[in-house]
Amino acid sequence: MPVSISMSMSRRLAPRLMSGACLIFLAGCGSSSDTGNGSAASQSPAAASRIPVVASTDVYGDLAEQIGGGKVTVTSIISDPDQDPHSYEANTQNRLALSKAKVVIENGGGYDDFIDRMLKSGGSSPEVINAVKVSGRTAPAGGELNEHVWYDFPTVAKLADRIAAALAEADPDDAATFTGKAKAFKGKLTPLEQKEAAIKADHGGEAVAVTEPVPLYMLQASGLRNATPEAFSEAVEEGDDVSPRTLRDTLALFTGKKVKALVYNEQTSGPQTERAEQAAKTAGIPVVPVTETLPRGEDYIGWMTANVDALASALAK
């Protein structure tokens, strides 16, 4: 009788997230326009007049910065590519930032519940933008919602408009500025959708594998078929055990060359995902790394351009 293989996923930063030193550092890892502790706003009238915005991750913090420009001070609570929002534990500095925020941007869908918990325990009432609600995405019949909506470019376009509207409500005098910046940002999304359409034209219907459902909206828009056993990707995402049979079926995708690429979430690691990655490499199947938060030094458009280009390059091999 086979013995079940324990997943022991260990999302890489979860132990460190519990350390006070890391949490204090994290609170200061927001956008360059704010240190996260409110000191910048107290140093000049210009800073004090900016709209305080808090985003659960730097993905949404970057959108707020691009649309708000110099009119906003943005604090991104999670801004380290090695951190996992699913296991994040908030601290007092995060609560302080939220208590001062006029606009809060969260992902929703169970991804960053710490935001809602802090808002409920605090006394503030900022404008809260929930990306999943903005997207209109719902769980398929008999399935679960894929909450990773920032990989869905039409959703991000809607979100840009929603952020502009929230900022305009907080600062009516600059409404036209926010609307204009949102329009410019959406214009930068168009080439990304065109790249997806080109992949669909060249590779529509081809099968790929994933370690987690993080990039599925991008893959679906590119006309690709996810051949990964659902039990595998769900177990990886939840940090649960992967059965020997599920692991065997997943590895067979690579040994049998049944997929054209493996799209691998670099922000999780564990023996099963590493075995999948190694099996893909051994079979000569390209591995496309993706992340859930911005790589260091990147903005949203640059990050997603690199992701789509890497996918196209892998499929062309």
Image: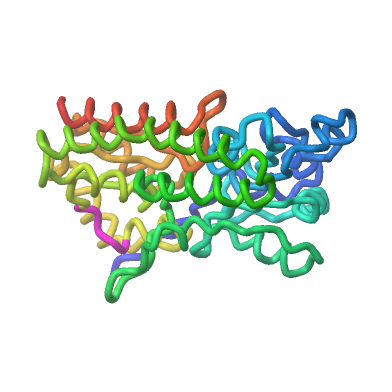
- Image coordinates of residue 29 in percent, x first then y, are 70, 35
Lateral position of residue 68 relative to residue 148, left or right: right
Q: How many marks?
A: 0
- Residue depicted at 67% across the width and 29% down the height: 70
Q: Is residue 43 magenta?
A: no
- Image coordinates of residue 281 in percent, x first then y, are 26, 31
- Residue depicted at 75% across the width and 42% down the height: 27
- Residue depicted at 55% across the width and 44% down the height: 60
The residue closer to the viewer here, 186 or 59, is 186
Q: Is residue 229 magenta?
A: yes
- Image coordinates of residue 252 in percent, x first then y, are 18, 49
Q: Splitting the image into 4 quarters, where does residue 134 fall?
A: bottom left
Chain part drawn in magenta: 227-231
Lateral position of residue 83 relative to residue 230, left or right: right
Above/below status of 29 relative to 95: above
Can the viewer see residue 82? no
Can the viewer see residue 57? yes
The residue closer to the viewer here, 148 or 136, is 136
The residue closer to the viewer here, 44 or 171, is 171
Mostly what secondary structure, the magenta segment? loop
Location of the C terminus (image quadrant): top left
Above/below status of 265 relative to 133: above
Location of the N terminus (image quadrant): bottom left
Lateral position of residue 307 relative to residue 19, left or right: left
Above/below status of 212 relative to 305: below
